[in-house]
Image (spheres, rainbow, N blue to C red):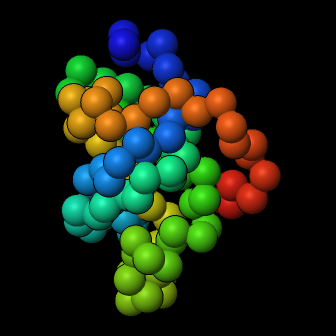
Amino acid sequence: MENGDVDGKRFVALREVTAKCIVILSPRVSDTRDVVLHPGEVLKVVSTHDDMVSCRPLRYAALEEALVTAELRAHAGYKGYGLVIDRAVFDGDCAPDTQSTDVGAGR
């Protein structure tokens, strides 16, 4: 897949996918941690790069409590979270989604 040719499209995790969860606390401060997304999770691609894919889960609000600690969510500068997946992992463990809708996507 070429950079940019899947931006805005939805993909589904075929198996457990390890991602980096980047919690945005301010323009200069963030917290990064490894998280595991379960099979069937639908991801909307935000942007693609040579070695990574930035995405937002369709169930953003529902996953927020599981992926971001209460302490970080309560931080005065909390702006949300984003997911980054290694390009090779994304290409091997995710496939185009043809089943889901954007209903309940949150933020």
Whether residue 44 is visible: yes
Q: What residue is rendered at 55% in x and 39% in y? A: 44
Instruction: Give the x, y percent position of residue 42.
Output: 54, 46
* Quadrant where the C terminus is found in the figure: bottom right
Report the side of 65 relative to 85 (left or right).
right
Instruction: Give the x, y percent position of residue 1.
Output: 36, 13
Report the side of 8 relative to 2 (left or right).
right
Quadrant of the image occupied by residue 13: top left
Foreground of the two, 31 or 11: 11
Q: What residue is rendered at 36% in x and 10% in y? A: 2
Q: Is residue 5 above or below residue 33?
A: above
Report the side of 43 relative to 82 (left or right).
right
Instruction: Give the x, y percent position of residue 92.
Output: 28, 30
Quadrant of the image occupied by residue 90: top left
Whether residue 8 is visible: no
Q: What residue is rendered at 61% in x and 67% in y? A: 61
Report the side of 63 relative to 33 (left or right).
right
Foreground of the two, 79 or 9: 9
Quadrant of the image occupied by residue 60: bottom right
Instruction: Give the x, y percent position of residue 75.
Output: 43, 83
